[in-house]
Amino acid sequence: MKNVVFYGGGNISQAVAEGLIKSGYEKNKIFYVDRNPKNKRILEKLQINNLEGNNTVKVDLFILAVKPKDAINAYKEILKKYERPKIISFVAGIKSKRYLKINQDIEFLRAMPNTSSKFNLGITAIFNSSFRKNNLKKVISLFKRIGMTIELEKEVKIDGFTGMVGSGPAYFFYLLKSYEKKLMSLCNKDKKKVNDIMVNLMKGISLSIEKDNLDNLIMAVASKKGTTEAGLKSFKSNKLDKIFEQGLDSAIKRSREISDE
Ligand SMILES: NC(=O)c1ccc[n+]([C@@H]2O[C@H](COP(=O)([O-])OP(=O)(O)OC[C@H]3O[C@@H](n4cnc5c(N)ncnc54)[C@H](OP(=O)(O)O)[C@@H]3O)[C@@H](O)[C@H]2O)c1
C-alpha cells in the first residue's frame, strides 16, 4: 500500500495517522478528505495532505472513518470518484453486505482499531470481506505498524471488538476519573502531580499484567484485613464487576443495533 486516504479525518483517523507516521510511514503518502474545519486544522498540523485539490494522486487504499450515520453517503462519494477502490471501513455496526450491495466491484474489509494506535499500542480487529489475499497481507502489515492485529473469521465478532476494544480505552479513562478526583484533594489540586501518579500507576499495571495473572496480582496487593481488602470488599458487595460487565454488554449490543438501523 502506498497512498492511503483517510475519508473522514476525526479522532480515530488522527490516532492511526499519528501511529503510522511514528512508525516511519512517509507523510507524503498519507491523505485525508474531511469537511470539518477543526479536524482539517489538526490534520494539517500532522502535515498530512488534503486529497481535495490533489487530483493526480493514485489512491491505493481508502480508510472510511466517518460516523455510522454518514457512512453510506461517504462510501458513495468514493465510488463516484474512484474506480474499483480498495476500502477499509472503521465504521461501527454497518455490515459489509450493505456496502457490497451498492457495489461489488471493490475490495472491502472492516477493521476496528482503537485510539492507542497513536502510541503504536493499538489493537485492530480485522474482518476481510473481499480483499485479495496479497492485498489483505499488505493491510495487515500496515496495521501491525501501529500495534497488534486480530483477524476475525466471522463478521459478527467485530461487534464484540467494537464494544470491547474500539470503545475500550474510554471505560478505563472513565474509571480513572473517580480516582483522579480523590487524588486531586490528596495532592492539593496539583494536576501535574496527579497526572504523574496516574501515569506511573497505569504503566506499573501494564508491566504487571505482562508477568502474572490477575488473581495473583490482586493477592500480591491485598493483605488480610488490610486497606485493599476493605476496598475490594466494597467493590464486590456493590457488584462493580457485574456493573462493568453490563456496560460492556451494552456497548456490544449497541454495535449490533447500529447494523440493523
Ligand atoms: N473514535 C474511536 O475511538 C473509534 C474507534 C474505532 C472505530 N471508530 C469508528 O470510526 C468512525 C469515525 O469515528 P471518529 O470518532 O473518528 O469520528 P469523528 O471524530 O466524528 O470524525 C469523522 C469526521 O468525518 C467527517 N465527515 C463525515 N462525513 C464526511 C464526508 N462525506 N466527507 C468529508 N468528511 C466527512 C466529519 O465531519 P463533521 O464533524 O462535519 O461531521 C468528521 O470530521 C466511526 O464510525 C466509529 O464507529 C471510532
Image (cartoon, helix red, strand yellow):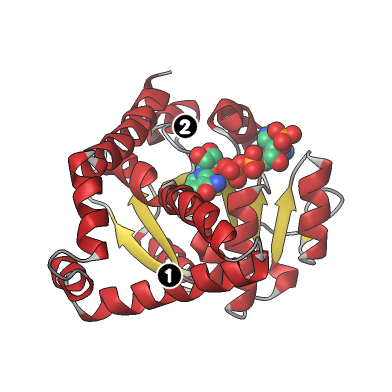
Which residue is at a point 81% across and 45% down the rendered structure image?
38
Which residue is at a point 43% across and 70% down the rendered structure image?
202
Label 2 sits on what residue type? Tyr
Residue identified by numbered label 2: 99
Viewed as shown, does residue 244 lie left or right of 48? Answer: left
Q: Position of residue 218 (x, y in %)?
A: 20, 67
In this rendering, is residue 45 above or below 10? below
Which residue is at a point 84% across and 43% down the rendered structure image?
37
| Between marks 2 and 1 in the image, the one whose residue lies nearer the viewer | 1
Q: Is residue 85 visible?
A: no
Numbered circle sitting on residue 202 = 1
Label 1 sits on what residue type? Met
**Ligand 1 located in image quadrant:** top right
Q: Is mark 1 within 8 Å of ligand 1?
A: no
Dot 2 or dot 1: first in sequence order is: 2
In this rendering, is residue 220 above or below 188? below
Farthest residue to the top: give it. Answer: 261
State the residue in front, 21 or 81. 21
Numbered circle sitting on residue 29 = none
Q: Residues within 10 Å of mark 1 (few under 14, many from 20)?
A: few
Q: Position of residue 4 (x, y in %)?
A: 63, 60
State the residue in front, 104 or 172. 172
Which residue is at a point 81% across and 63% down the rendered structure image?
45
Q: Quadrant of the N terminus?
A: bottom right
